[in-house]
Image: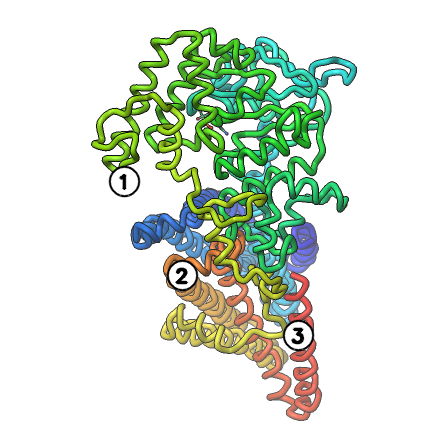
Amino acid sequence: MLLWSSPQQIIIAVFFLYRELGAAVFAGLAVLVIMLIVNYFISTFVKNIQDEQMKLKDQRIKIMQEILNGIKVVKLYAWEKKMMNMVDDIRKKELITLRKLAYLNAATTLSWAIAPFLVAVLTFGIYVLIDPENNVLTPQVTFVSLALFNILRFPLAALGIVIPQVVNTKVSVNRLNEFFAEEEIKPEELGRLESSKADAVRLKEATFAWGAKELNPTLNDVDFTAKRGQLVAIVGRVGSGKSSLLQAILGEMNRISGERLVSGSAAYVPQQAWIRNQTLRQNILFNKPMERDFYELVIDACALPPDIAHLPGGDQTEIGEKGINLSGGQKQRISLARAVYANTDIILLDDPLSAVDAHVGKHIFENVISSKTGMLKDKTRIFVTHGLAFLKHCDQIIVMKDGKICESGGYNELLSQQGAFSDLIEEFLIEEAKGRGRSVSFGEDAKDVTEILDHIDKVNPNKRKALESQISQEITNQRRSSNVSPTPASPKGESIPMTDVKKAATAAVAINGAVAEGNSEPQNAVPLKNEEKQALLESGPAKPAPNKSKIIEKEAVQTGKVDWAVYLAYFKAIGMPITLAFVLIYIASSIAGVFGNLYLAWWSDDAKRIVDEDPSGHETYVKLGTYSALGMAQATTICLASIVMTLGMVRASKYLHTGILKNVLHSPMQFFDVTPLGRIINRFSKDVSDIDSRLPSFIINFFGSFLQSLMIMFIPIYVTPPILFFIVPTLVLYYYLCVWIFGHFLRTW
Ligand SMILES: Nc1ncnc2c1ncn2[C@@H]1O[C@H](COP(=O)(O)OP(=O)(O)OP(=O)(O)O)[C@@H](O)[C@H]1O
């Protein structure tokens, strides 16, 4: 509103001034125009610096997010100091921009504060110079003009505040525009297949890239079809493009050429499970209505009952922002359960069994994924996996290599081809024998390995022998390095004669920790991984303890009024000498203001005498000069106070940010387990930003208004003391009203 009302007020005041002072008023107007131009340039500087500050702030928040995401590693390596220095380096640059902004804002304040006086002095001066004979500054002319110049003060000062705000808005709008202008997935890109067609997913000669104008597409010339109800496995080496293929089907990648058609709804189980800060049940239902029987079926199929039984609040246990009280395997099973519960036509599974134990993996495969016994047997399942045991149960296997499909077909067919698939299988077997690498599951025992080797034997007996000897060599190496007591199969550590592959393979799996010895779990229960057991043990007793089901405390906001200790801490951060200097300068400025007003009052009392005794107007010029000097003194001291305070506040910003950063980074892991990341990031973004930008202007305005109100009250109290009886109750009422509004305002913030 000020943006349009201020110019209006200026125009009206200038019009009346013109009637009073004639053409001389244009000299004053010229000053205003110059001020506007100067301020325009200042605003441009401000905008550029604010842009820079926003970029630095984004950088700082990005680093903070990365640090907090990997806080466990930071703490394990004692990297707190290094991380602090990284953030501090950016913060230092940010503080330099804040300082520059403080100077520029002070220049704006000063220019608009002295503008009315400059305009007055110049206009009166020109007025007298134009016609010294007739244009005499009589009190009548001077007072009317001064009153009009006084009217000019508010809109001019308001423009000084509004113009930077308009600039801020423009900076923010530009930043938002950048987001709005980001490339989006076009709905027409996602071609739909008719539901009557036998195919559920079809990619034809399709090339996909991650970026919009990617020169090197990630997926090239992909021909892929998944029939309705089929279980399609996608295998390949790390980085071969398996996950990208799923993302391409989901429509998350840019199609450069070819065709992408999908039929019906789809659910997606990502490689890294995504867990919301809600109860376990809410994480599975995901806003879908509760269907008790189906829900229980899903829970059972995903092997979740033992976990739920061990959680303090059962499936009503709140699981943290990042699933902090859960093991990787538990998180993955919840993520899978969510997708199964979604009951969609297509389900895309990105290595969903990688973090679960071989036993649990087998249970889930049989009860969820399998085409014979799984809950999803009628759905189209596209299943990225490294689990050899599952491949023979798939209807189709797709082998990815360097972003291309290099082989596809049935299990036996691909093994017989002795191509990329059989190479991959060999690699998996050897890797598993090494007892490292990804979670390659042989199943509950080595039956699957034997089967695979038998298969290879049929195709190429020599290859089997070579592979067996390689596996046995790896197992021997592994035993040597891990000090596992030798099994009868290798009494002296030499190569195991592969007469019984089953034994050797079981040993390999045992080294990998996949076979649980002395399993005390009931036969029918799904055994849990060690880390899962540990997580359950740590999460409390088996008995339901509802009070323990909540991990994350609600964030408390102080309402009503802020403690004095908080103000004191803030002023301490600014530095007491700076605070004192600010208060003194501001008092001096207010005294100059009061004197200006009193001087005007004395002058008007004296006006009649001046007209009678000094027709030349000499005394009027002196009085005008004194009045203007007082005004200038007030404007300059306000500006000085604002510079002092803003610089003090930049100091406080530095001090407070370093303090909070140090405290957060040195907090125990427990703190990160119960505090959502978003809450910590909020402190570093919104709260620090408030301290940097909003608080300084609030405090300066508060002091300004407070002292001005005191001075305004001082004059009537000085002239008519009984007015105190009205002023004091009004102040008390005003105080309580403020406290109430402030409390309400904070609660609804
Ligand atoms: N979200 C993404 N944005 C940009 N590039 C990506 C993204 N995801 C994957 N890529 C790139 O695509 C290529 C293929 O990666 P992808 O994750 O599809 O391989 P993968 O076969 O699934 O590997 P893994 O077995 O490790 O999951 C890699 O070069 C990777 O850097």
Residue pictured at 55% horizontal, 44% vertical: 523
Mark 3 neighbour density, 10 Å: few (under 14) some (14–19) many (20 or more):
some
Residue 288 in the image: state x and y as whole percent.
Answer: 74, 42
Q: Which residue shows up at 34% across the image and 9% down it? A: 462
- From the viewer's side, name the closer residue of 140 and 263: 263
Let me know if residue 38 appears in the view: no
Q: Amino acid at mark 3?
A: Cys
- Residue denoted by label 3: 738
Q: Which residue is mark 2?
A: 667
* First of labels 3, 1 by sequence position: 1
For mark 2, give the secondary structure. Answer: loop
Which element is circle 3 on? helix
| Front disc: 3 or 2 | 2
Asked if residue 427 lies left or right of residue 172, the reply is: left
478 vs 630, nearest the viewer: 478
Q: Nearer the viewer, mark 1 or mark 2?
A: 1
Q: Which mark, by number, is residue 94?
A: none
Q: Does 347 sit above or below residue 656? A: above
| Label 2 CB-ligand 1 distance < 8 A | no
* Residue 588 horizontal/vertical position (percent): 45, 76
Q: How dense is the environment of label 1, judged by Cα within 10 Å: few (below 14), some, or many (20 and up)?
A: few
The residue wearing badge 1 is 485
In the image, residue 496 lies at what x, y percent? 28, 25
